[in-house]
Image: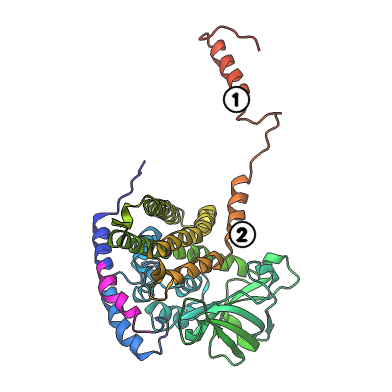
Amino acid sequence: MSWEFETDPAFAAELEWVDEFVRTEVEPVDHVIEHAWDVTDPLRNKLIRPLQQIVRERKLWACHLGPELGGPGYGQLKLALLNEILGRTHSGPVVFGCQAPDSGNAEILAHYGTDDLKKRYLEPLISGEIMSAYSMTEPRGGSDPTGFVTRAVLDGEEWVIDGEKWFSSHARFASFLVLLAVTEPEAPPHERASMFIVPMDTPGIEIIRNVGVWGHPEAEGTHAYIRYNAVRIPADHLLGERGNGFAVAQTRLGGGRIHHAMRTVGVVKACLEMMLERAVSRQTKGQRLADLQLVQEMIADSWIQLEQFRLLVLQTAWKIDRYNDYKKVLIDISAVKAAMPKVLSDVASRAIQIHGSLGISTEMPFGKYLLEAHHMALADGATELHKIQVAKQLVRGLRPNPDLFPSGHLPAKAAAARKKFAEAGALPEFPS
């Protein structure tokens, strides 16, 4: 039996290097570029590509991938420890080659892509030459994918795609889209859709608008509302089997959820760090904020929430490594996903309170973090759905108690205990 909470010394040393590298080299980049995913931006490339090369030489590039795909094969637990450092930055995941949505799309291509698709799309994606987008959600179908209506119809050697997709993040930076569309409309609900690779330069792809998010000051939004107008792609751009799109989607959604949680640990840590600095630096009525009991309560509650959440994330990552199957860790991933937005919202809110008017200003990042908490409550499935998933998994297979009183009923337990010890001669017979 092995049970420990230590990082092996060699990787711990790497994490110390990463922490220093991110603080001194990566974080400054966030303040001078608009978007780390925009590979067409000369300034972005000038600043980020040399950093990416340093990461490659350090053998920390694309830690979510195995050696056969160009990564070090560190697994999810080590990725979690890395991501909680990268999560406090905008550019960090891109510098280390483990950014969303590309990390999840790479997993899909690795599992379901043909050799040709891997060469054309996966290899340049892993190398950081191009970006991708995930086109799944629809204007009328969000958390219920069985309500999707975008269609793909096979016409000879081509699929013809018609429909609309909503909030396809980073589509304006992408070279290709990973698209879910209905191909078997008469099949059972979860067997109707299929997954495809759609090159972004295919005729008929119309970005109606790029939607922005509060707290993200880009000149143009990065979440595309897309219309597919008779878009034709080769028949071999199907990922997996026809009608198997939902199963293919889980390959990336399980990883995407836990990766969001890993990075959120980093954001919450950053909030706590700023909260602590403010508490020991600011005085009121002759006392530090840190000496006031209500502030101490806020600090304590924040640290406890962070540590509880972090341990749940790390344990979930450990289970994924152990079982190598997201299906066996469904309840853990759903629990992490459900816990994530509240932890971030609570700690960011306390940080705002301790910073006062400065906390609500655009001169501190807490407002953005609050909105990010709501984003995390929606991305890859709403919090409420994941709570339902946890409950369903917990009660699955349980049989109802046939007795009049529950199994925890104390008089019944006491009577059973007296009977047990009386039969063993340790106690005299008691009347029932």
Q: Position of residue 407 (x, y in %)?
A: 62, 30
Task: Compare residues 49 and 44 and report the one nearer the observer.
Answer: 44
Q: Position of residue 48 (x, y in %)?
A: 32, 81
Task: Determine crowd level at label 2: few under 14, some 14-19, many 20+ residues with C-alpha closer than 10 A.
Answer: some
Task: Determine crowd level at label 1: few under 14, some 14-19, many 20+ residues with C-alpha closer than 10 A.
Answer: few
Task: Compare residues 428 and 196 and report the one nearer the observer.
Answer: 428
Asked which quadrant contains residue 60, the reply is bottom left
Disc nearest the viewer among 2 and 1: 1
Residue at position x 64%, y 41% from top? 398
Alpha carbon distance from label 2 to label 1: 35 Å
Q: Amino acid at mark 1?
A: Leu
- Is 322 on the left-hand or right-hand side of 208? left
Task: Compare residues 413 and 245 and report the one nearer the observer.
Answer: 413
Q: Amino acid at mark 2?
A: Leu
Asked which quadrant contains residue 65, the reply is bottom left
User: How many callouts does the rendering have?
Assistant: 2
Residue furthest top as drawn:
428
Q: Position of residue 98 (x, y in %)?
A: 40, 71
Residue at position x 60%, y 84% from top? 226
Q: Position of residue 140 (x, y in %)?
A: 68, 74
Task: Compare residues 368 and 187 and report the one nearer the observer.
Answer: 368
Question: Can residue 8 be seen in this snapshot?
Answer: yes
Residue under numbered circle 1: 410
Q: Earlier in the sequence, mark 2 or mark 1?
A: 2
Residue 385 bears which disc, if any? Answer: 2
Q: Which residues are magenta?
A: 20-33
Question: Can residue 74 be seen in this snapshot?
Answer: no
